[in-house]
Image (cartoon, rainbow, N blue to C red):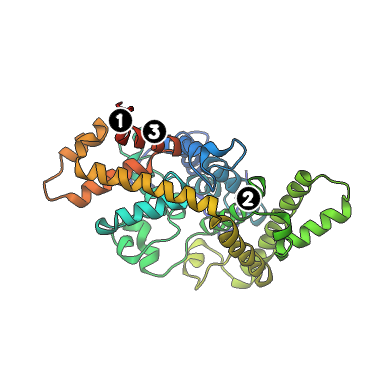
Amino acid sequence: MQKLAPYSANSEYSRGRQYTEDSPSYRSEYQRDRDRIVHSVAFRRLEYKTQVFVNHEGDLFRTRLTHSIEVAQIARSIARELDLNEDLTEAISLAHDLGHTPFGHSGQDTLNACMKGYGGFEHNLQSLRVVDVLEQRYAEFQGINLTFETREGILKHCSKKNAAELGDVGQRFLRSRQPGLEAQLANLADSIAYNNHDVDDGLRGGLITVEQLREIRLFAIQCETVSKIYPQLDTRRMINETVRRMINYLVVDLIETSRARLLDSGVSSIDEVRNYPEPILMHSDAVAKESLELKRFLQRNLYEHYRVLRMSKKAGRVINKMFQAFMEDYRILPTQYHELSAELPDNSESMRARIVADYIAGMTDRFAINEYRRLFEPGELT
């Protein structure tokens, strides 16, 4: 059995689930959460949802599914070193992107614009909505009925307006409190994974170059080390070795800095963690600065590359046109969504918009493209 620090989350003292259930046999409450996430439809859909490159652009690029698995691996390794709850950390990591739209951030931005008059759209809130409402697997309740601690970790950001409608899980945003350490860790592991793996995918896709990255300290130091130790290494293996070392560098710094901060903070319980004035887990100032430099580089040179922007424009058009079409005539929604819409009062346009957003957000990249064709191309009638 894993040794847990007194400030970690212990499943025996969980705040529980929205619907009361008997305790699981031979596994903890957080293991049950993880298993329910892995078996969900939303988790399987992540295989065909964009990280940076649209799914059909290549078989070796990251998807939301591979990204989530990589986040869970990094987070769990750190949790073990800090004596935090590995199972809870893994559950949060695997669930954090369940609400993402097709086509990555461009899809989210477009759907948010479409929903501007209806409460907006944010993928963290949608991830919570997926596990609380949209997954339909159990006879006794809707959603997959996760524990409070996993649901809290999924919700990284939230406005006070939205938090006021979320019950217990929204309270920390209203009271300016911190989430548990496992939630803090999953958030940091997410940043480590996507920054470094987007470097790998950007180089593989030819959108950024090694020469450009040599100007970025985090990459340059590790790349120089690799070149000195392995001067004859081919380019692909050099990139792989450099990215591997970048991740290790960030993980070691996070462990060592967080361990020192935990000691200095004096916290001895999860309640004290929640009441602490700032997050406890973090990188050192120097490494945080290096990570920010890399993040800004990727924003300028990868996410705003003309090829990515072209795909983003097309993706935005697909989502916008589908949203407008479904709002104009909800009868063209699939039967289950049509039935939900038909049950709404005539003045419930915002609720109908939310149903349309649920449908679109649940699409994979390729399903969205095919659904667009079925709606707007004469040769595609079904």
> Which one is closest to the eye, mark 1 or mark 2?
1
Q: Is residue 137 above or below residue 175?
A: above
Residue 83 falls left or right of residue 97: right
Q: Is residue 323 above or below residue 178?
A: above
Question: Tag 3: residue type?
Answer: Asn
- Front in this rendered view, residue 349 or 134: 349
Disc 2 marks a residue whose amino acid type is Gly
Can you identify the residue that label 2 sits on? Answer: 202
Give the residue pinned by disc 1.
378
Answer with mark 1 or mark 2, whichever residue precedes in sequence: 2
Q: CA distance from mark 2 to mark 3?
A: 26 Å
Which residue position is annotated with label 3? 370
Q: Are marks 1 and 3 in contact (CB under 8 Å)?
A: no
Tell whether label 3 touches label 2 (CB within 8 Å). Answer: no
* Rendered location of residue 377, percent (x, y): 33, 33
Q: Residues within 10 Å of mark 1 (few under 14, many from 20)?
A: few
- Residue 249 lies in quadrant: bottom right
Give the answer, above or below, for where 366 lies relative to 294: above
Q: What SS does tag 1 mark?
A: loop
Q: Residue at x 33, y 32 (%)?
A: 374
Label 3 residue SS = helix
Tell me the quarter of the image containing the C terminus. Answer: top left
Query: Where is residue 5 drawn, in percent x and y?
Result: 60, 57
Query: Label 2's element?
Result: helix
Task: Between residue 370 and residue 192, name the one nearer to us.
Answer: 370
Measured Cα–Cα span from mark 1 to mark 3: 13 Å
